[in-house]
Image (tube, rainbow, N blue to C red):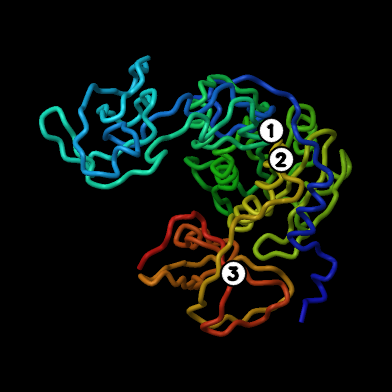
């Protein structure tokens, strides 16, 4: 049964859809070389300037011949060689002859197939084809991969390594991409100290800004670190006002719950607006989304695990929309199905992300084991886990052997 206290909280999907509906993607474009464009989002369609490959070429080391000459074991006279990078000979290959050819070399005029070297016997200046060949065999046709003047990568694509290889293969050296997103980071709390400083009684080290910076490292963002802001309304107002003028998005950790010193949410509401607060997920309930002028505000919880999970599950999809990716709906990270290795009993009401270990046996079957410590203040289990076991909000118990949904931290298999 769903927890009545959570009945007015937004589900994760509802929160993401609400956030998406209020976002305005970046439209400013810059030009980068392809060596600098990894992780940026295309501002224009990429139209192929050339055919790829540009001409018919050999897919194998072997011999360029007429297919009809291979139907009988008749030796063919080798009349020349064709290497990759050589211009094509204007002379037409004659029947009864062959040209030694290397992978990537242009197909000689007249030849209609390439016989791989392993299917031939060379004796002096003649070659015998030991297996009949088909017309077109082992020939890569011009434009087989890409036709000139066709769109090969669409506007709004987040450029990966494979996209850059494709661009280089067409001779494209510069691309138009959307500018980096300006993202501010801040943490609030009198109890917080920077790593490397000496702690006094009652103080703890601040880590959420470090986590946010690392999670955003693969995206086109410029980070401004506003540091640790004390639980002081004047200091907080100054930072928020500064961020509103200079940032596209601000990630703030702490100060969005209901404590006596939790000023952030109310201050954002007074300077701008809060669109929603509290999401029915665990960990991560006190997440605030709003706006400071043109700056989007994402207030993650102060507890390290809650901040980490909400940044992964909510803030990253928001940023991907803002940097111009062509996605109308939020894209949640890929999930797989696995077998649960231990029973689970819990209080229903919130979608839960349990830190877990995902394994795969030699047969390819996947198993998931939740780690014992799931408190939102226990970051060690995040480093020990390789996945989240996702439990739907309305599920209170799961038996050992149940098929469950798992979100891997990466796509690499986990082999025992």
Say whether marks 1 and 2 touch (CB < 8 Å).
yes
**Quadrant of the rendered structure where residue 245 is?**
top right
Q: Secondary structure at mark 3?
A: strand
Q: Is residue 11 left or right of residue 410?
A: right
Label 3 Cα crowd, 10 Å radius (few <14 / some 14-19 / many 20+): some
Identify the residue shown where x is 38% and y is 41%: 137
Image mark for residue 155: 1
Q: How many marks?
A: 3
Q: Is residue 95 left or right of residue 400?
A: left
Q: State yes or no: discs 3 and 1 in contact (Cβ < 8 Å).
A: no
The earlier-in-sequence mark between 1 and 2 is 1
- Dot 2 lies on which element? loop
How far from the left and from the top, in percent, is residue 318?
Answer: 71, 45
**Residue under pointer 2:** 326
Among the 4 quarters of the image, the one containing residue 281: bottom right
Name the foreground residue: 195 vs 288: 288
Q: Secondary structure at mark 1?
A: loop
Quadrant occupied by the C terminus: bottom left
In the depicted structure, whether residue 240 falls above or below residue 379: above
Residue 25 screen position, x and y as percent: 76, 35
- Residue at the location (69% across, 41% down)? 319
The numbered mark at residue 405 is 3
Q: Earlier in the sequence, mark 3 or mark 1?
A: 1
The quadrant the N terminus occupies is bottom right
As measured in the structure, the alpha-carbon distance from the residue carrying label 3 to the one carrying label 1 is 32 Å
Residue occupying image coordinates x 35% and y 70%: 362
Q: Which disc, if any, is residue 300?
A: none
Earlier-in-chain disc, 3 versus 2: 2
């Amino acid at each position: 049964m769903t927890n009545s206290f959570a009945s007015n909280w937004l589900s994760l999907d509802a929160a993401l859809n609400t956030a998406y509906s209020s976002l305005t993607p970046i439209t400013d474009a810059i030009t980068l070389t392809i060596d600098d464009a990894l992780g940026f989002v295309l501002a224009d369609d990429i139209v192929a300037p050339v055919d790829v490959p540009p001409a018919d070429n050999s897919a194998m080391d072997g011999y360029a011949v007429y297919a009809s000459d291979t139907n009988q074991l008749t030796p063919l006279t080798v009349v020349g060689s064709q290497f990759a990078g050589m211009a094509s000979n204007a002379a037409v290959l004659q029947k009864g002859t062959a040209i030694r050819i290397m992978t990537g070399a242009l197909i000689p005029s007249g030849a209609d197939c390439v016989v791989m070297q392993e299917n031939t016997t060379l004796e002096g200046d003649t070659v015998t084809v030991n297996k009949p060949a088909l017309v077109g065999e082992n020939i890569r046709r011009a434009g087989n991969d890409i036709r000139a003047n066709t769109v090969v990568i669409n506007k709004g694509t987040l450029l990966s390594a494979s996209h850059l290889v494709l661009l280089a293969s067409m001779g494209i050296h510069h691309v138009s991409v959307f500018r980096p997103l300006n993202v501010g980071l801040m943490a609030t709390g009198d109890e917080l100290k920077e790593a490397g400083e000496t702690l006094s009684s009652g103080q703890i080290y601040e880590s959420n800004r470090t986590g946010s910076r690392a999670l955003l490292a693969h995206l086109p963002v410029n980070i401004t670190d506003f540091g640790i802001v004390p639980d002081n309304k004047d200091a907080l107002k100054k930072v928020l006002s500064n961020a509103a003028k200079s940032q596209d998005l601000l990630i703030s950790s702490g100060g969005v719950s209901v404590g006596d010193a939790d000023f952030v949410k109310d201050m954002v509401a007074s300077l701008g607006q809060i669109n929603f607060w509290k999401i029915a997920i665990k960990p991560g309930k006190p997440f605030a989304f709003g706006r400071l002028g043109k700056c989007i505000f994402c207030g993650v919880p102060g507890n390290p695990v809650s901040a980490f999970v909400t940044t992964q599950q909510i803030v990253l999809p928001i940023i991907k929309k803002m940097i111009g990716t062509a996605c109308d709906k939020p894209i949640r990270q890929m999930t797989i199905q696995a077998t649960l290795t231990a029973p689970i009993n819990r209080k229903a009401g919130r979608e839960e992300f349990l830190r877990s270990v995902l394994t795969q046996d030699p047969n390819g079957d996947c198993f998931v084991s939740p780690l014992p410590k799931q408190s939102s203040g226990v970051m060690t289990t995040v480093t020990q886990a390789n996945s989240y076991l996702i439990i739907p909000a309305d599920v209170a118990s799961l038996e050992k052997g149940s098929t469950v949904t798992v979100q891997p931290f990466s796509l690499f298999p986990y082999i025992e």
